[in-house]
Image (cartoon, helix red, strand yellow):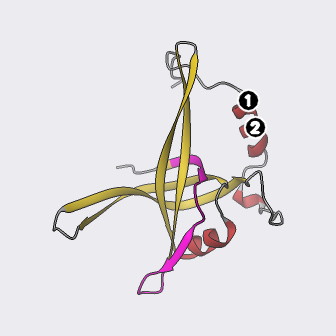
């Protein structure tokens, strides 16, 4: 079976780190992914929000390197959390558990000093490729899928 998520999105808030009773660090943050599409001659946009968790050394690293507005490439898996609320009603939600996160763009308005990202953390020309993609209109829903 396969459970793999690959997502490019922006952080909607600063990451929050906490520690499990075992001492394992857990960082939580949210990503937003915007979908642009065309209806007749009008462009529309919808936003999708995702809850993300990271554990261990990755959690500690992300809690210090990321903040609201950063654009990242996230690789991970889906995990369902289940619990009972105060009335005993069964509840659940699906989150993304991060396995790898790469910074591809910092917020446009940023007061902090730029940090160098090691080459192992990102593809050499990904920022140029993303810039070129942003300038192109997205595929029309009627276009054929190339796979």
| Residue 113 horizontal/vertical position (percent) | 83, 66
Residue at coordinates 75% horizontally, 33% vertically from top-left? 132
Tell which of 33 and 123 is nearer to you: 33
> SS class of the residue under badge 1?
helix
Q: Is residue 140 left or right of residue 83?
A: right
| Residue 133 horizontal/vertical position (percent) | 70, 32
Q: Is residue 7 left or right of residue 108?
A: left
Residue at coordinates 57% horizontally, 13% vertically from top-left? 41
Crowding near pointer 2: few (<14 within 10 Å), some, many (20+)?
A: few
Residues at discs 2 and 1 in contact (Cβ within 8 Å): yes
| Residue 76 horizontal/vertical position (percent) | 49, 56
Tell which of 26 and 117 is nearer to you: 26
Residue at coordinates 49% horizontally, 15% vertically from top-left? 142
The verdict on residue 116 being magenta is no
The verdict on residue 10 being magenta is yes
Tell which of 102 and 86 is nearer to you: 86
Residue at coordinates 76% horizontally, 44% vertically from top-left? 127
> SS class of the residue under badge 2?
helix
Instruction: Kindly report the distance in space between the C-alpha atoms of the residues bearing marks 2 and 1.
Output: 7 Å
Query: What count of labels does the image hold?
Result: 2
From the viewer's perspective, is residue 116 above or below residue 127? below
From the viewer's perspective, is residue 32 above or below residue 88? above
Crowding near pointer 1: few (<14 within 10 Å), some, many (20+)?
A: few
- Considering every residue shown, the one lying at the far front of the view is 87
Residue highlighted by disc 2? 131
Q: Is residue 119 left or right of residue 19?
A: right
Q: Which mark is residue 118?
A: none
Magenta-highlighted residues? 6-24
Q: Which mark is residue 135?
A: 1
Q: Quadrant of residue 16?
A: bottom right
């Amino acid at each position: 079976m396969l459970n793999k998520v690959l997502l490019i999105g922006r952080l909607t808030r600063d990451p929050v780190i906490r520690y499990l009773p075992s001492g394992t660090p857990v960082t939580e943050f949210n990503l937003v992914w915007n979908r642009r599409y065309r209806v007749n001659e009008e462009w529309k946009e919808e936003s999708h929000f995702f809850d993300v968790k990271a554990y261990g050394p990755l959690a500690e690293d992300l809690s210090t390197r990321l903040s609201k507005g950063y654009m990242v490439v996230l690789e991970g898996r889906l995990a369902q959390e289940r619990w009972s609320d105060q009335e005993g009603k069964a509840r659940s939600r699906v989150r993304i558990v991060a396995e790898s996160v790469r910074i591809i763009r910092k917020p446009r308005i940023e007061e902090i000093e730029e940090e160098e990202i090691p080459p192992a953390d990102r593809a050499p020309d990904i920022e140029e490729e993303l810039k070129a993609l942003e300038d192109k209109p997205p595929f029309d829903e009627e276009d054929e899928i190339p796979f």
